[in-house]
Image (cartoon, grey):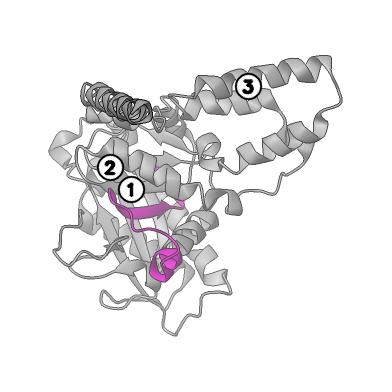
């Protein structure tokens, strides 16, 4: 009889523990429950001014509106499997174990770092100063950190439009962004990568520039030349191309042109699709003179995406530009990057 009573008491205690856990969890908001598992990246507020000064590569991601936080974590989870494979081969232990540089990158790109992990990094610094016999362990831990490359390399840029995410690299590495997105599509098709829930499209940005005729022509010319010279691309004669320009809902009326209009007079002009198309087409023909427009089956597609950056001066417009192969774009109903998930209900976002 004594054993049965003990078993009953144990069952009652376990039930009470489960009940208490459920009650404490129910008091937390859904996002608080989510945040207990993952950290939330924070915006790099230096990125917009940097984008105005020089070209960057990165990724523009469309996602479900009001699910930007979930999409951000999903995107970082995806890129963590690919970005490291395409980054530079600076794998020396001395460079990898530069804890000061690693800490700075963490501060830029990560909002909530597990306190225990931060303490372990601090204790590692102390041990490095006091004892010199754990260099191998330090190197191995640094390599482990490097496997999480997007946490250190990609910056989250604040935008003014909902349903969009912008992740940028510190500089420009135009070929790598195309390779990364191509690899993501291959793994999605093979089933080795799980279909995303919140991210709809990932547009690889090869380069950025301010929206003026001279800079846009230079960037397009450079990227088209890279595409033509890439031996992996088998091109027919004449070369078929198409141009896409997405203003993301920003119209001429929304842009306040500064007083020094002489310097920025072509900003509002290039917001016109036809003018932008003619500028890009002229740049393409400057590289491949016999190139022809083909909107149904282009061999290369030049996509220009207006980036709705937050925190930039009025009249300062930045675009992301890419020259994409045929397998990464869809032409119907309009020219754009392919969706990550083929939804039969047609619920994919723009």
Element type where label 3 sits in the image = helix
Is residue 202 rendered magenta in the image? yes
Q: Which mark is residue 61?
A: 1
Dividing the picture into quadrants, the one containing residue 345 is bottom left
Residue occupying image coordinates x 23% and y 30%: 30
Q: Dot 1: within a 10 Å radius of its alpha carbon, few (fewer than 14), some, or many (20 or more) residues? A: many
Question: Which numbered disc, 3 or 2, marks the residue that appears first in the sequence?
Answer: 3
Q: Position of residue 146 (x, y in %)?
A: 62, 40
Q: CA distance from mark 3 to mark 2?
A: 35 Å
Disc 2, disc 1: CB below 8 Å? Answer: yes
Residue at label 2?
164
Q: Is residue 53 left or right of residue 14?
A: right
Out of 80 and 318, give the one closest to the viewer.
Answer: 80
Give the magenta range: 185-209
Dividing the picture into quadrants, the one containing residue 25 is top left
Q: Is residue 258 left or right of residue 232?
A: left
Q: Is residue 115 left or right of residue 161?
A: right
Q: Hey, which residue is sitting farthest front in the picture?
A: 1
Q: Which mark is residue 328?
A: none
Q: CA distance from mark 1 to mark 3?
A: 34 Å
Q: CA distance from mark 2 to mark 1?
A: 6 Å
Question: Which numbered disc, 1 or 3, marks the residue that appears first in the sequence?
Answer: 1
Q: Is residue 291 left or right of residue 82?
A: left
Q: Nearer the viewer, mark 1 or mark 3?
A: 3
Is residue 122 rendered magenta in the image? no
Element type where label 1 sits in the image = strand
In this view, 85 is above or below 123: below
Q: Position of residue 161 (x, y in %)?
A: 22, 37
Residue at label 3?
120
In this view, 330 is above or below 49: below
Residue 176: in sight, yes or no?
Answer: yes
Out of 342 and 12, give the one closest to the viewer.
Answer: 12
């Amino acid at each position: 009889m004594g054993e049965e009573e003990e078993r009953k008491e144990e069952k009652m205690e376990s039930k009470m523990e489960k009940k208490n856990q459920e009650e404490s969890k129910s008091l937390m908001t859904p996002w608080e429950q989510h945040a207990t598992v993952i950290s939330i990246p924070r915006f790099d507020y230096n990125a917009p001014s940097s984008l105005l000064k020089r070209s960057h590569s990165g990724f523009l991601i469309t996602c479900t509106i009001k699910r930007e936080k979930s999409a951000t974590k999903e995107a970082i989870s995806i890129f963590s499997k690919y970005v490291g494979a395409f980054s530079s081969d600076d794998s020396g232990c001395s460079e990898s174990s530069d804890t000061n540089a690693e800490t700075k990158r963490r501060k830029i790109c990560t909002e909530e770092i597990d306190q225990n992990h931060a303490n372990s990094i601090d204790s590692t610094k102390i041990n490095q100063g006091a004892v010199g016999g754990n260099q191998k362990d330090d190197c191995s831990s640094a390599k482990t950190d490097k496997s999480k490359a997007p946490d250190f390399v990609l910056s989250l840029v604040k935008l003014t439009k909902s349903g969009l995410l912008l992740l940028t690299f510190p500089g420009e590495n135009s070929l790598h962004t195309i390779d990364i997105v191509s690899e993501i599509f291959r793994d999605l098709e093979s089933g080795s990568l799980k279909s995303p829930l919140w991210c709809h499209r990932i547009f690889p940005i090869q380069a950025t520039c301010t929206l003026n005729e001279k800079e846009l022509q230079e960037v397009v010319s450079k990227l088209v030349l890279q595409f033509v010279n890439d031996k992996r691309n088998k091109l027919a004669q004449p070369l078929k191309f198409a141009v896409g320009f997405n203003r993301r809902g920003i119209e001429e009326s929304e842009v306040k042109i500064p007083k020094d209009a002489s310097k920025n007079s072509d900003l509002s002009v290039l917001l016109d699709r036809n003018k932008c198309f003619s500028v890009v087409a002229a740049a393409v023909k400057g590289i491949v003179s016999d190139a022809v427009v083909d909107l149904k089956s282009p061999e290369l597609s030049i996509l220009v995406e207006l980036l709705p950056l937050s925190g930039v001066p009025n009249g300062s417009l930045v675009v992301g530009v890419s020259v994409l192969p045929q397998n990464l774009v869809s032409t119907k109903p309009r020219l754009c990057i392919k969706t990550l998930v083929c939804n039969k209900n047609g619920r994919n976002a723009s």
